[in-house]
Amino acid sequence: SFIDDKYVTGPPDDVYQVVRNIQAILPSQIGGTLRKCEILYGPDAAAKTPVQLQEIGINNAVVAIGGVEVVGFPVGTTAYIQESIRTKAIQHEQQQQPITALANDDRQSALLTFMNCKLRRAHYTTQAIPFDAAPVEYAKLDEDLITAWCQITDISRAEIEIDPNTMRRLRLPYRRGGQGLPAIADIADAALIATWAKVAQWTEAQFGAPAAIINA
């Protein structure tokens, strides 16, 4: 068994001490080891190399370049976030292939799998990553989703693009007579604000007024 993904934030020396404590506690109290420690330094921090970290008692350390993923969300520089979204778009495109292949035998099952699994996972990062942070990458992901939908339903892109109203209907939710395939650009801001609203009370308690953070 394993304990997955724990995050510690703070000044480097404080984080180092926490990691050393974890390394000491795991073998004696749980019977395990720290498999990997990934450290992301802020722009003003005095970063150490993995060798230097080992010298101060931190084993299996990796120094993150640009950012890290926190529960599936890229956190770091703009370039890191853009590359992460681009990579996710490629992964989604690859993972869609078995679903589109399933449509040859069972179109209904393929469409349900795509809409309820693949589409939701593709939209997941919009809960924490602003659309403007990676507009080109999100646009590519959105295009891939439309292409996959066309392949599953056996409807060509030309058919849905010949009339602008057709694409607009495709984007509408089922309850509005659409196909439930919203454009990422249309839902991203709402998803981000909803996440902020969900954690506003905790954010205010920890860091001060959340409205000031959101407005920033």
Image (cartoon, rainbow, N blue to C red):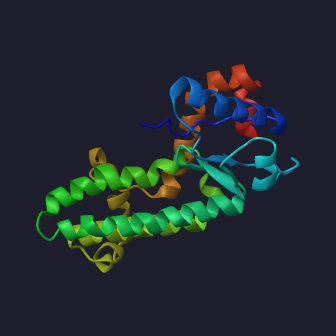
Vertical placement of 62 versus 89: above or below? Answer: above
Q: Quadrant of the C terminus?
A: top right
Vertical placement of 92 versus 177: above or below? Answer: below
Camera-nearest residue between 116 and 19: 19
Answer with left or right where residue 28 lies relative to residue 24: left
Answer with left or right where residue 8 lies relative to residue 29: right
Expressed as whole percent of the image width and height from the top left, the position of residue 202 reads 64, 23
Camera-nearest residue between 84 and 186: 84
Vertical placement of 190 versus 82: above or below? Answer: above
Camera-nearest residue between 102 and 184: 102
Q: Quadrant of the N terminus?
A: top left
Residue extending farthest to the left is 105
Vertical placement of 197 versus 64: above or below? Answer: above
Q: What residue appears at the point 72 percent right and 23 percent down from the top-left corner?
A: 206
Q: Is residue 178 visible?
A: no
Answer with left or right where residue 79 lies relative to residue 113: right
Camera-nearest residue between 144 and 58: 58
**Residue 164 occupies quadrant:** bottom left
Expressed as whole percent of the image width and height from the top left, the position of residue 20 reads 72, 34
Q: What residue appears at the point 69 percent right and 45 percent down from the top-left corner?
A: 59
Expressed as whole percent of the image width and height from the top left, the position of residue 188 reads 53, 50
Q: Is residue 62 visible?
A: yes
Expressed as whole percent of the image width and height from the top left, the position of residue 4 reads 51, 39
Q: What residue appears at the point 60 percent right and 47 percent down from the top-left corner?
A: 36
